[in-house]
Amino acid sequence: MTKKDLTAQESYEYVSGQHGGYWRHDFIDHNYLYNLYFPPEDFFHHLTSHIHQLVLSYPVGQQELASLVGELIDQPPERIVVGNGAAELIKIIAGLGRKLIVPVPSFNEYANVMPAGQVVEFALKAPSFELDVDKFAAEAIRTEARLAVIVSPNNPTSLLVPKAQLIRLADTLANHDCLLIVDESFIDFAANRDQETLEPEIDQHPNLAIFKSMSKAYSICGIRIGYMLTANTDFAARIRQGLHIWNLNGFAEEFLRLAPRYRQAFTASCNRVKADRDHFYEQLQTIPDLIVYKPEANYIFCRLPDHGASGPEITEQLFVKHNIYIKHCQGKTMPESDRYLRIASRTQPENMSLVGALTDLVAQERIS
């Protein structure tokens, strides 16, 4: 089924029920979160020139994959577990038999994969949605959680928890047999990425693990790569036990082999994303009565005016009237979730088109 077979309304209903494959439909995607400026075309030329080998041959196993990621991030392979996207690694932690605590709203998958009764949801207070790490630690200790998850920058809020606070949290939890997982999938878009990532500190905190989806920053959603980095060899071994022998395909392996040669291009692409995002943030702030949160990722969290269309209604109108698809936050674990939007930044012209369309929709609701 393609969009040409459907009305705009039918297309919206179809697309909103999918989890991908958007490229098959003709709309502007401000929902999914990826880097529009990476990988370089040279990477795709390489894949097409090696297509026979990549399709016909078995890929390498976990040990070699960990070495490839280790070369890219300058870490020893014994600290690394490579997954078919971070989602595969998140699924494995559900089978460890440990109670997990996670702030909400956040990336739902951490809570979704856990067995009933094994998740503690720690509510982030509106309107700031900032994490109080001391209160979070106290709740983790009170509930006897053995895994604590922080997504930083957070999804959907695009807010970052400062590195110093995360280190303090890890140290506090270490005294209570609780391992801290920090999901840094969006850290490459943070204003001070090198100062905020915990990767350089990993060997100093044995109760710390970093999860990272490479799909977002490296824009390789279709070939699925994520990794875990930890100095806790026992925890790494337990995660590895949950993987099958060939959990990544040859295309993913080939990306990892080529990625180190694109370091400068990758950094430049992230800088372009940040520049577009910052300009987008400034323009969204011009929309009357729209609350716009200062972002640290490649998407922006907004609150719609109290009196007017809801997030789902605005999302539908943007698609049907303007062929633009964004994500509303209805269903996220937070009060008045239907008032919030998460909007991915794209190119500046596309961002400006969205600002114009959203301005008109919000203004119509104010007039009516």
Image: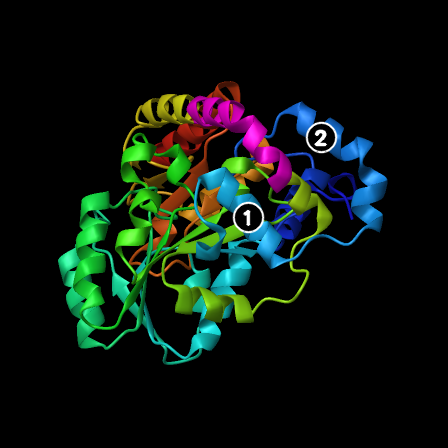
Mark 1: secondary structure: helix
Give coordinates of residue 44: x percent, y percent.
Answer: 71, 30
- On the picture, is 357 further left or further right than 15? left
Neighbor class of circle 2 (other Cα within 10 Å; few <14, some 14-19, many 20+) is few
Q: Main secondary structure of the magenta part?
A: helix
The residue under label 2 is 44
Q: Residue at x 26, y 53 (%)?
A: 204
Q: Is residue 272 magenta?
A: yes
Magenta segment range? Answer: 256-273
Give coordinates of residue 331: x percent, y percent.
Answer: 42, 59
Q: Disc 2 residue type?
A: Phe
- On the picture, is 111 further left or further right than 59? left
Q: Disc 1 residue type?
A: Ser
Q: Quadrant of residue 233?
A: bottom left
Give coordinates of residue 12: x percent, y percent.
Answer: 62, 46
Q: Where 300 falls versus 145 (above or below)? A: above
Q: Which mark is residue 148?
A: none
Q: Residue furthest top?
A: 349
Q: Quadrant of residue 247?
A: bottom right
Q: Quadrant of residue 124?
A: bottom left
Depth check, front residue: 82 or 298: 82
Depth check, front residue: 161 or 206: 206
Give coordinates of residue 345: x percent, y percent.
Answer: 46, 31
Q: Which mark is residue 67?
A: 1
Neighbor class of circle 1 (other Cα within 10 Å; few <14, some 14-19, many 20+) is many
Point out the tag, 1 or 2, that comes first from the N-terminus: 2
